[in-house]
Image (tube, rainbow, N blue to C red):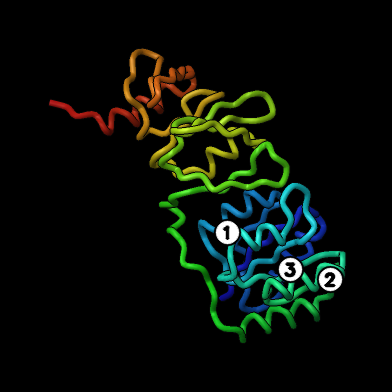
Amino acid sequence: MLSCYIIDDEEHAVELLKDYIAKTPGMQLGGWSHNPVIGLQEVTAQPPDILFLDVDMPGLSGLDVFKILGNQYRVIFTTGHPQYAVDAYDLAAADFLLKPIRYERFVMAVERVKHSQPAKATATPADNPQSVFVQTGNKGKVVKVALADIVYAESLNNFIRIHLTKETITVYLSLRDLTEQLPASKFFRVHRSYTINLERVTAIEGNRIWMDGGAEVPVGAQYRTAFFERIDKRMLKK
């Protein structure tokens, strides 16, 4: 069974590929995303057998995503612009599908992947990632962030600030979306505006948490019980 993942910012394009995958024997959909940054994180966490990757997306193109992933993934590019074909083949993609995609051509591309050499990337298990990719305030720029370097993340209106041990980066993503991408074993949302790295906590007093570097983070009322239950599990007791 071939696992598949789709990264495409067009709803109708994703729905078409989902339909093609569902009716093709030996294929199963592992996931999809309209956001290339989120898709990049999910693909690196759990590499699929085939990645259907749209070329022309805002902020981060499919070609950029491919270059970040490296050539160990079997990628089938999709696009409505035939001029990208040369770039796709230069990057050694498995195939290139021109929109609107015909089912016969889709099957042909899949068969080509089946008969190619396996190229699934060796990746960190999904439940124990060591880093994430985030799109910063600089349009189109994606940076790799080591989880161990994250002290806490702070929500500010339509963006968040990720406070690292040596710098702070701005990310146009919701705190909820970021928190869902972080391993729950190490990160915990303690307030509607804050998610912290439990390994970076230095002290807790009342409803205040002190982090590495001296930052002080509040504990929200709706998060208090769950947070202290988590802390209690790691508490040394007599």
Give whichever of discs 1 and 3 has the lower sequence position: 1
In the depicted structure, whether residue 61 falls above or below residue 122: above
What amino acid is found at the position of numbered circle 3 in the picture? Phe
The residue that mark 1 highlights is 43
Q: Secondary structure at mark 3?
A: strand
User: Residue shown at 80%/57% (left/top)?
Assistant: 56
State the mark number for residue 138.
none
Residue 226's x, y, as percent?
Answer: 41, 28
Distance of label 1 from label 3 (alpha carbons): 15 Å
What amino acid is found at the position of numbered circle 1 in the picture? Val
Give whichever of discs 2 and 3 has the lower sequence position: 3
Pick the residue in front: 237 or 85: 85
Residue 147's x, y, as percent?
Answer: 45, 43
Does 126 sit left or right of 236 as displayed?
Answer: right
The residue that mark 2 highlights is 98
In the depicted structure, whether residue 29 falls above or below residue 156: below
Asked where in the image residue 15 lies, by quadrant, the reply is bottom right
In the depicted structure, whether residue 175 falls above or below residue 205: below
Residue 151's x, y, as percent?
Answer: 44, 32
Distance of label 2 from label 3 (alpha carbons): 8 Å
Residue 194's x, y, as percent?
Answer: 52, 26
What amino acid is found at the position of numbered circle 2 in the picture? Leu
The residue that mark 3 highlights is 77
Dot 2 crowding, Cα within 10 Å, few <14, some 14–19, many 20+: some
